Image (cartoon, rainbow, N blue to C red):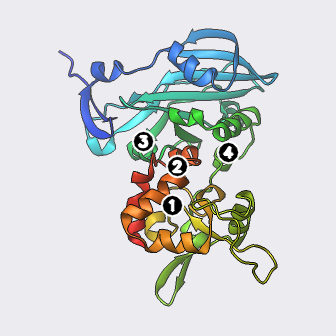
Amino acid sequence: MRNKIVYKNILTGKIVRELEEEYSKRNIDTSVFENLFLNNFNFKVLKKESIQGFTYYKTLLDDQIINITFQNIRNSGIKNDDKKRFQIGNKLPIIDSDVNSWFIGTYNTGDKILFVITEDLEFSLKLKNISSLSSIWIDFDGLIDCYKYQKSVRDNKNGRRYFFFDSSLFSNKDFVSNVKSLLLNSESSFNIDKAFKYTLFDEEKYLLIKEEVIELKRDANLRTQAIIKAGFKCEICEINNTFIDREGVMYFEGHHLIPYNYNNQQNFKYLLDTQDNIVCLCPNCHKKIHLSPIETIKEMLIKLTQSRKEFLEVFGLKSENDIINLYNYE
C-alpha cells in the first residue's frame, strides 16, 4: 500500500501537518477564482479550457488580450519538514506567443485565500528559448511571509519572480488599479513597486546611526503634504487656528499614526514613513498623543483610524487595538 503524503501547511495561521486528501478539500474551484480574481479586475473571458490539469483563460482587459493560467498551489510532499516547499504546476502549457501571459496560483489557508502571480510567462520563454515552463517552486517561508504580511516577493530557483497577496486587498482600489496596470504592461523587469503603492523598507537606504542611537531617515515633505491635505486643521480636536509660524502659515505638526521608529519598522515589510501614515495635529494634540496615558491615546486613535481603515488593513492592522501596543516603544 502506497504511503500517504503528509503535507506541512499553514492552516488558520498555524503550521500543521495534514494528509493530501485533507489539503485538497480546501482547493478553490474555477467559479470561485473567476469571482474573486477575474471579476475584480474586470476581465472579459473570451475562451476557457482545461489543459494538462490547468484552467486556461483567454481574456480581454481594457481592449488588450491577456492569457491567464490558473491552478491551486500544491505541496511538494517531501518528508523532510525543513525542505517542504510549494509547487505551481508541472510543465506549464504555452499558448499564444507574443501575448501577455500570467500564471495565477491560489492557496486556501482556511481563513484566507492567498494568490500568487508569476512574472510574464512569455517573457520567460523568450529569455530561455524554451517551449514550456517547468514547475515553479515556492519556499515555505515565502508562504508564511505572505500569510503574515499580506504580500511578499521573492526570486525562485528558476530565476523568475512572483508576488503574493491576500484576497482582502481586492477592496483596496489603489491595489487593484496598480496590479491591473502591471498585467497590462509586461516588461523585461518585473518590478513589485508597480504592483503596490507602498515602498519596501530597506535598512541600507533608511537606517541612520547617530552616536550609537539607531534612527530612521524621514521625508520632511510628507509632513507638509499631510497638513495641506487636512486643510490646516487638527485631525483630532479640529482646531484650525494655532499661530502663524516664521514662514507665514498656520502652524501644525505631522504625526506618524503607526509610530515610525526602528523597533516598530522591523514588524513591517513596507516603509512606515509614507503619506497615508502621517496625520495633521495641532501642537497640543501631538504632545497629548505621545505623553498621555494609554486609555487617552486609544481614544485619540479611534478618531484617527476611522478614515484610514483601508491603509491599516494593507499593513495588517484592523483597529486602534492593534496600533496601541506599538506606542509602548516610545
Q: Name the image quarter holding residue 224.
A: bottom right
Comparing marks 3 and 1, which lies closer to the viewer? 1
Q: Along the polypeptide, which appears first: circle 4 or circle 3?
A: 3
Q: Along the polypeptide, which appears first: circle 1 or circle 4?
A: 4
Residue shown at 42% from the left, 32% from the top: 112
Q: Along the polypeptide, which appears first: circle 2 or circle 1?
A: 1
**Image marks 4 and 2: residues in contact by CB distance under 8 Å:** no
Q: Which residue is mark 1?
A: 258
Q: CA distance from mark 3 to mark 1?
A: 21 Å
**Image marks 1 and 4: residues in contact by CB distance under 8 Å:** no
Q: Amino acid at mark 1?
A: Ile
Q: Quadrant of the C terminus?
A: bottom left
**Towards the viewer: 254 or 145:** 254
Q: Which residue is mark 2?
A: 312
Q: CA distance from mark 4 to mark 2?
A: 26 Å
Q: CA distance from mark 1 to mark 4?
A: 30 Å
Q: Which residue is mark 3?
A: 147
Residue 241's spot in the image, x, y percent?
71, 70
Q: CA distance from mark 2 to mark 1?
A: 9 Å
